[in-house]
Image: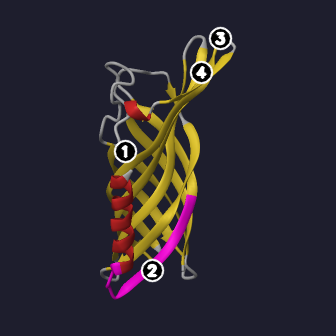
Amino acid sequence: MKKLLFFTAIVLFGFTYVSAQDCNFGAKVGVNIATLNSDNFDSFDNRTSFHLGFVAEIGITETFSFQPELVYSSQGSGYSEDDFEGTVKLNYLNVPLIAKIYVAEGFSLEAGPQIGLLLSATDEGEFDGGSYDEDIKEFIKGLDIGVNLGVGYKLESGLNFGARYNLGLVDVNDDYEEGGTYKNGVIQAYLGFFF
């Protein structure tokens, strides 16, 4: 918990310490279509959830910006087998570091790495008429690393929207399923506003 608080403080301090010519702060909210990609299991389904957070767009040139973000993201996956179905819920505090290239008026291509800190992890479902709800945080790695690719559009009013895909690069399974590999995959659509 101390590491999480320290990490969050550093990111927030970085947002407020920015001394660039053109810097805008904003917020965003959106929908996630998440799954766990695995070579070992084919029973994972999409899980629809949400994300929300704060952004700072730092203009470097007229066509290039750097955009660090601090985002709460609800991820994971649904799954089903012969006689049970459930949902793995993984909640992260993500820090995307996005490079934005404006290719037309207001329209940008976006790419960059992302670090995610696991906040909570549960496995919930139904089995033979009963239900279960298990805390699995100790079995999921606390750090996730991924890469984002996306597009965005920003209006002069500050309203903006876009879509991204986050490809997880790290196996987040830490002995939850023996021999299983889980990598996050998240499609995101968002609506934001720069103040």
Residue linked to disc 3: 128
Which stretch appears magenta? 17-29
Q: CA distance from mark 1 to mark 4?
A: 25 Å
Give, as a three-letter code, the residue at label 2.
Answer: Asn
* Residue for point 35% across, 22% down: 180
Q: CA distance from mark 4 to mark 3?
A: 10 Å
Residue linked to disc 4: 85
Q: CA distance from mark 2 to mark 3?
A: 53 Å
Q: Position of residue 68 (x, y in %)?
A: 37, 67
Circle 3: element type: loop
Which of pointers 1 and 3 indicates the residue nearer the eye? 3
Give, as a three-letter code, the residue at label 1.
Answer: Leu
Q: Residues within 10 Å of mark 2 (few under 14, many from 20)?
A: some
Circle 4: element type: strand
Q: Quadrant of residue 58?
A: bottom left
Which of pointers 4 and 3 indicates the residue nearer the eye? 3
